[in-house]
Image: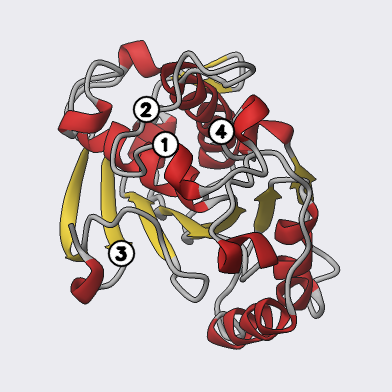
Amino acid sequence: MSSPTDRPSGQLHLLFVRHGETQDNIDKILQGLRDTSLTEKGLREGEILAKKLQNQRIDAVYHSPLNRIVQTIRPILADRSDIPVHADADLTGQSLGQLEGGSYDTIDMSNPRSADGQPGVELFDDFVRRLKKVLAVIVGTESRQVGEQDRTVLIATHGVGITSIFKALEASPSCEGFNPKLAVRGPEAYEVRWTDSDDVAKLVVPRPRDLPVKDGSLDWSALSGQPFVIERWGKREKAL
């Protein structure tokens, strides 16, 4: 009798998008968990993103519940009323406590741990662990639904979240200590501080049925090798 891994299997594609422009982006204000809305330009950026994805099959959507994210993905979902959509608070950006509403100059934007220790701030390490936890649930759930065809999932979150999880998977210096290197980078993937609103970053699991899943969640401790491929990330001209 053949095992599940013996049967032909498609790949799991994870598409990551961030929100469009907000007034806080313009004013260089730290948003964190502030529930801001898109500007007129930001709403147009959502339409541009939807047009970019109009011919892309999407099987499920997971998103941060903050309004700027909801507004951004609304055009993407307009003609996809039949797919499951999941709001998850673990996909919000890093909580910045009393720094929220303050200037970018309050912290060193190049150092992900520079806000640690400030009142109410979620420690950066705790933030990355939260991202890994929600990604484990998404990958654990969706990998078991991959059949002979590829399955594509859209994850709408915040720029700092996309950058942090990709760097963690790569075990880059700013995100070391969370796991061994679990991802390789393709030729169209460029490390960036944050993605633009029209970017669609892409993480691929070539052999999803081989992933260790326990209680519906990816078991990070049982992973070996580099099961993830960062196929697309940022723009060459904005690479670090």
Circle 1 crowding by C-alpha within 10 Å: few under 14, some 14–19, many from 20? some
Is 85 left or right of 48, judged from the image as shown? right
Please tell me in which quadrant of the rendered image residue 202 appears.
Answer: bottom left
- Residue at left offset 42%, top offset 36%: 107
Residue under numbered circle 2: 114
Residue under numbered circle 1: 107
Q: Disc 4 marks which amino acid? A: Gln
Q: Secondary structure at mark 2?
A: loop
Q: Are marks 2 and 1 in contact (CB under 8 Å)?
A: yes
Q: Secondary structure at mark 3?
A: strand
Separation of residues labelled 2 and 3 (CA atoms): 28 Å
Residue under numbered circle 4: 94
Q: Is residue 179 above or below residue 167?
A: above
Percent coordinates x, y for residue 134 in the rendering: 58, 29
Q: Disc 3 marks which amino acid? A: Arg
Please tell me in which quadrant of the rendered image residue 165 appears.
Answer: top left
Is 187 left or right of 107, judged from the image as shown? left
Q: Nearer the viewer, mark 1 or mark 4?
A: 1
- Residue at left offset 21%, top offset 37%: 170
Instruction: Quarter of the image for the C terminus: give it.
Output: bottom left
- Residue at left offset 44%, top offset 33%: 4
Q: Is residue 17 above or below residue 180?
A: below
Residue under numbered circle 3: 232
